[in-house]
Image (cartoon, rainbow, N blue to C red):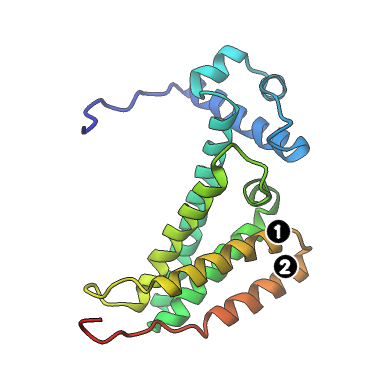
Amino acid sequence: MDKTDKPARVSPRGAATRSALLRAAAQVFRTVGFAKAGVSEVVSLAGASVGSLYHHFTGKADLYLALYEEFQQRQQERTHQAVKDARARGESDPTRLMNIAAHAYLLGCIEERDTARLFFSGDGPPGFDHQLRDRLTQWTDRNVALFRKADEPVDEALLIVVSGSMLLAVAEVVRRDDQDAHELADDITGLLSLLESRRRPEGD
């Protein structure tokens, strides 16, 4: 069923309260982890009420997912801009474009290391690991699509290799200091640039 309702308007005060709750939730999750975090801690740190939290979110898991959506949006903007800039410089090779996108994604995780660690540590709401893999696979598919023409099928093996590599890469780079993390990001995306999509004969 299509949704026909217009999105509810949020007052400036309501938007400010929502932002404060998200900032507080991020700080609490980073400090004690998602599992040990309590709604009361988030509300106290945000200077808000329990009622205001449940006005904007359904609970602790919803706060976590909202933080992830904001992070993922920033990551999409980073990778999109990196590819756009590369194209503007005349880059058209699909392998290098995918490599540039993957590198930008890893650099974003390093830049927001504390935030990225929240989502790749395994300490999240039930089922989040599966959602994280799905979202990263979707992101990877858009970049792997650089390898194929519009009417060509997805190279599932390439998609699995790249998305699996990125999942492990992010989990590792966010654990390291800046220099090691950047060197590892360079090494990983350098290896990814060696991958090639398999061109299958028609009818296979």
Instruction: Return the x and y of residue 87 as percentages of the image width and height.
Output: 39, 76
User: Callout 2: 10 Å neighbours few (<14), some, many (20+)?
Assistant: many
Instruction: Return the x and y of residue 127 as percentages of the image width and height.
Output: 54, 41
Instruction: Return the x and y of residue 66 as percentages of the image width and height.
Output: 52, 37
Q: Are discs 2 and 1 less than 8 Å apart at CB?
A: yes
Above or below: residue 118 compared with residue 184: above
User: Callout 1: 10 Å neighbours few (<14), some, many (20+)?
Assistant: many
> Residue drawn 42% across and 23% down?
10
Quick one: SS at disc 1?
loop
> Residue drawn 20% across and 82% down?
203
* Separation of residues labelled 2 and 1 (CA atoms): 7 Å
Mark sitting on residue 181: 2
Total numbered circles:
2
The residue labelled by disc 1 is 174
Residue 80 located left or right of residue 64: left
Above or below: residue 126 compared with residue 95: above
Q: Quadrant of the C terminus?
A: bottom left
> Residue drawn 70% across and 73% down?
184
Q: Amino acid at mark 1?
A: Val
Quick one: SS at disc 2?
helix
